[in-house]
Image (cartoon, coloured by chain):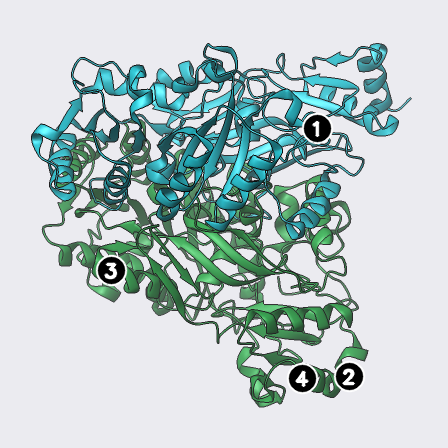
Chain colours: A cyan, B green
Amino acid sequence: MSMEEKQNSQTFQDFSQSTFKPKTTEEISSIIKECFKKNIPLEVCGLKSKKNIGRNFQAEKTLDLSNYTGIIEYKPEELYIKVKAGTPLNEIKSELDKNNQQLAFEPVDFGPLFSGKSNEGSIGGIISCNFAGPRRFKVGSARDHVLGFQGVNGKGEVIKSGGTVVKNVTGYDLSKMLTGSYGTLVVLTEISIKVLPKPPSNKTVVIENPHLDKALDYLNLALSSSSDPSGGVFYPEYFREHFTFNDLTTEGPITAIRIEGHNDSIDYRIKKLCKELEVQKEEIVILEPEQSNIFWEKTRSLQVFSELENNLLRVVIPASEALEVINRLKIYKIKYFVDWGGNLIWVQLDNISAKTLRNIRETINKSFGYVTVIKIEESLKALVDIFTIDPIKYKITEKIKKSFDPKRILNPGKMYSGI
Amino acid sequence: MTSLQMPKVEKSIISNKEKIVTDISKIIKRDNILSHDDETKPYETDALAAYKQAPLVVVLPETVEQVSKILKYCDENKIKVVPRGAGTGLSGGSLPLADCVLLAMGKFNKILELDYKNKCVVAQPCVTNLAITQAVQDKGFYYAPDPSSQIACSIGGNVAENSGGVHSLKYGVTTNNLLGIEVVLMDGTITRFGGKTMDAEGYDFLGLMTGSEGLLGVITEVTVKILKKPEVVKAALVGFPTIEDAGKCVAQIIAEGCIPAGMEIMDKALTKATNDYSKAGYPTDAEAMMIIEFDGTEHDVEADMNKAKKIAEENNSSSLKISKSNSERLKFWAGRKAAFPACGVLAPDYMCMDGSIPRGKLAEVLKEISRLSKKYDLPVANAFHAGDGNLHPLIMFDANNEESLKKTEEFGAEILKYCVKVGGALTGEHGVGIEKRELMCEAFNNLDIQQQLKIKFALDPNSLLNPGKVYPILRKCAEEGRVHVHGGKTKFPNIPRF
């Protein structure tokens, strides 16, 4: 018996189980090799915080990475952390806290939406789904922070790309490719991520009672100014109950812009920003750091959709299209809020049909954007497209999928039928 | 490497030259096809000028449809295609092949849209990097990645190579500043990856194409994001008595939460050479000289600069000068930017290496380079983008002396291997091209390379688009290792030794 066979037989005394919880890369590799040999599709998951996002699909067995955890290496002065894919984000955050560092892209917490309480998920899941929070427009998305990875492809081969340094152009940049691929290309095992210092402080300028068009103008101006904001949202009036801060007196809609940095600099930039936006002192409220943190935490974790029973769409568009898109979607009786300074709209719909969704998608596509279905009633899930793709990209996607996972073993159908 | 194997030359393609020219002249104007030796010769090399090979023909398409038809024609007739932007690449990425159609994108040179509302610029691929900044600077915007060749290099080439620059710690490299591309695949398919939105849905083909060195598709349009210019930019010029002190200073600045816009270190040899060359006022007695640049608001810059000054002093800095004006700041940089030509004065030739290392390993790596310099008896000077760990050792030699050249290549390869050994990368920003192809197996094992090749074959099954670049030709690391071809049998006959 070769070393490899010996290893497989050791791992697979019990291949009959329906859920595997491997603890080592070797185990993950041998499970996938076995599944490849026997044509067994696998559902790959971490902490299941985003399990409901994506299409439903049939998988005979589950590869659960929740026992595959741990920080492999953390070098604060080199600005990176290398972790095992199943590591909970909370664990990573508390480690980074010790050195006043963070994952700057603010991963979205979908816990409140799906379960009513925070569930940050595992780092593997965060990278696989590529959802960045409010700071996206300033620092980039999850994909911009992945420096390298090791993973197991659909044949059970352990492969790697990238490394731990920021500048690396050796070979294709597969780290980007895997970010946002929903576990359909490889099972991530080790991930190296760029970390950055936490800003010393932050404050938020809240402009009360703007109309939508004015609010979008404010956001656009703020993002174009050298006051360097790191968050820009608009909440309509119906979401105001979620933001009961002492200083916020009126009940109308709000535009909020976050400024981070040294205290002196924040105050200076706020003054400058208000001048650029031509808003008077009495039109704004400044949230001090503590309240500001709460505000953005609520935004990052989609608190306004906590335990939402209805449907939620994520609409990404060029900022210039935001006003028209929102106005067009109003006929569907939506509730929404605007994030990323006008580049992202979270859209809640009480009622939806496959036809409505198709129409909405058409509207958004015409505005050069796209729609991802985040939450939809189960009865409709099999009938609608969760992600958008055109025929040419589908063909390319199919070829790329085949190059990593020729037998379609890893999360088959999670993103698109046939992929 | 001096004895570099290139893809087999198809004699049937070469003998078919006239027919190929006639066929392509049905797609583009005959004037846009260069087929005479005198016309193709100017395209025989890029900025890795030691390697030369004129292509079979040069074609200069003007529209994306023409690019598509040319690629489809070449795909169907199994003709190799080498894409070329401005030809400023340092790793031989657009070195032609004797039997290739060189797809020169020079006529794609227009800026198509300045979109301030979405803070982006749409440009054709042969617009220069600097032209993008110039087009938006009157409105106070700029394009962040600034490779040193920015005056000449094309934005399409920047995408193909994922170019960096001196500000990439804070502002990222090309891939972090790119929103979308239009691309043509080898089979002629025209498609778009990304657009004006932040993040596209589905597999990140934009990320895959960026830095793929022209092996996966030909870029015909680029959308990049632009940033508002910072209010204040200041630089400090700091001297250190040892490289270790400079290295520690870098680590401490970052550990204390400062992210400078740029942070550059030069060793004594380079400091002296550049100072003699550009009269930048550098502290020539220092063993290491550092430029630290901060940008932002007056408050931010002052606070960060004070912190950096304190840290530099704690790490034994021997001199420290903070720029009092923008012209003084630019003078600080002028020396650094003249580092390469300055080396040209010291020796008949120099070879610029491009490894990435963890910042904390700088002293160790420089010590090793200095040991190797003695071993090979070749002088070396070092420039280091300390902010992002990108090291450029400049090995000085005489190309007319074949022995000296061979030694230089070995020396360079040993440096890059050492970079990988300490946790870095073979190439930080110049690309693999042909220059570092044989070293790929130092960074990747066979399975890693095979996976990358499978992606290549998924999009270009006949391996016609820029073949012979990036990946070792024999495909398996175990077979190739660091190849030295013996007996000249498989050598690419038209590449001269230099």
Give the image location of residue B219, x and y in percent: 54, 62
Q: Observer-nearest residue: A327 or A243?
A: A327
* Residue for point 68% across, 31% down: A383
- Say which residue label 1 marks: A411
**Is there one chain holding both mark 2 and mark 4?**
yes
Report the amino acid beneath label 3. Answer: Gln
* Residue for point 75% across, 36% down: A405
Q: Residues within 10 Å of mark 3 (few under 14, many from 20)?
A: some
Distance from label 3 to label 1 (Cα)? 47 Å
Return the chain for callout 1. Answer: A
Distance from label 4 to label 1 (Cα)? 47 Å
Residue B169, image quadrant: top left
Q: Residues within 10 Å of mark 1 (few under 14, many from 20)?
A: many
Residue A136 lies, with reference to residue A381, above or below; the image says: below
Q: Secondary structure at mark 2?
A: loop
Numbered circle sitting on residue B26 = 4
- Say which residue label 3 marks: B137
Report the amino acid beneath label 4. Answer: Lys
Mark 3 and 1 residues: CB-CB less than 8 Å, in contact?
Answer: no
